[in-house]
Image (cartoon, rainbow, N blue to C red):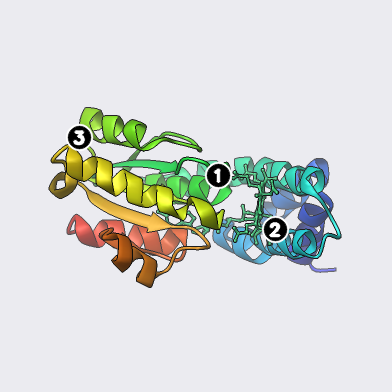
Amino acid sequence: MDILKRLEEAVVRGNMDEVKDLTQSALDNNLAPLTILDQGMIKGLEVVGQKFECQQIFIPEMLLSAMAMKEGLSLLKPRLENSDTPNLGKVVIGTVEGDVHDIGKNIVSMMLTGAGFQVVDLGFDVPAHKFLDAVKQEKADILALSCLFTPTRLAMKDVLQALLEANMRDKVKVLIGGAPIDQKFCDLIGADGYAPDAPGGVQKARAWLGK
Ligand code: B12
């Protein structure tokens, strides 16, 4: 069986050792890190999501798959973050309050780093005031917000409101993303931009800073 298909299935089974070994083999076979991610690991998590929806698996299994994915991602990290480009600007990133999904956010963070941005990652379940403090303290050019769990989308609006109340809204560009986000929602809450994936986010960030 094709190595990427085996990787997908190992993520579905949540087998950490297998995911790590197969990711290493894929790299040894000169497969590009983005191909390994998109056509192996992320496909696996999509299957996991479908199985969870049909109640074929439950939270512990979903968590195991996430942990296995993180093992594989740790091998891709140095390659995704490797950059010889000068510092393009500063990005503060995090998953919004109430949401613990951080794999997509971590990938965006790695790819921004790889593109030459300095990234300050606040982690997940981040309240609006923490984003505000970090933007001020770090003098960030861009604030990147992630969410996966649909009800937490509204926490993005709270962050924008906090920036507005602190007279900081025009000091930082706000980029949003995550599975339940689209351009319509972006327009609705008044964020500066949306991207459907990590490469799209990098593209937007570069364009904003004129790079
Ligand atoms: C792994 C997982 C978990 C893990 C998370 C572990 C972790 N550390 O992240 C655990 C087990 C903890 C978990 C918990 C829950 N989960 Co969950 N989870 C998933 C799963 C299987 C994969 C998510 C993932 O990492 N995908 C892969 C990454 C790479 O994709 P991504 O995040 O979308 O990111 C890409 C883009 O969206 C974009 N992007 C993301 N962020 C940003 C930000 C910016 C700025 C930009 C530009 C782009 C961008 O770029 C990324 C890469 O290109 C999904 C199913 C799925 N299909 O996604 C369900 C899913 C997201 N979970 C779901 C649910 C319901 C839950 C729980 C509520 C379950 C429960 N009953 O408790 C809890 C939520 C708890 C909470 N308060 O947050 C639902 C959400 C449904 C909905 N529409 O709201 C899903 C869709 C499963 C399903 N089909 O029902 N989950």
Task: Indicate whether 76 appears above or below 43.
Answer: above
Query: Which of the 4 image quarters holds residue 60?
Result: top right
The earlier-in-sequence mark between 2 and 3 is 2
Residue assigned mark 3 = 139
For ligand 1, tell me if the residue under mark 1 lies within 8 Å: yes
Q: Amino acid at mark 1?
A: Asp
- Mark 3 to mark 1: distance in Å? 23 Å
Of the 4 image quadrants, the one containing the N terminus is: bottom right
Assess disc 1: are there few (<14), some (14-19) or many (≥20) residues with their C-alpha within 10 Å of its C-alpha: many
Mark number for residue 45?
A: 2
* x and y percentages locating residue 156 in the rendered image: 38, 50
- Mark 2 touches mark 3? (CB < 8 Å): no
Is residue 201 visible in the rendered image? The answer is: yes
- Say which mark, if any, is on residue 102: 1
Quarter of the picture containing the C terminus is bottom left
Q: Nearer the viewer, residue 1 or 142?
A: 142
Left or right of residue 8, residue 162 in this image: left
Q: Is mark 3 within 8 Å of ligand 1?
A: no
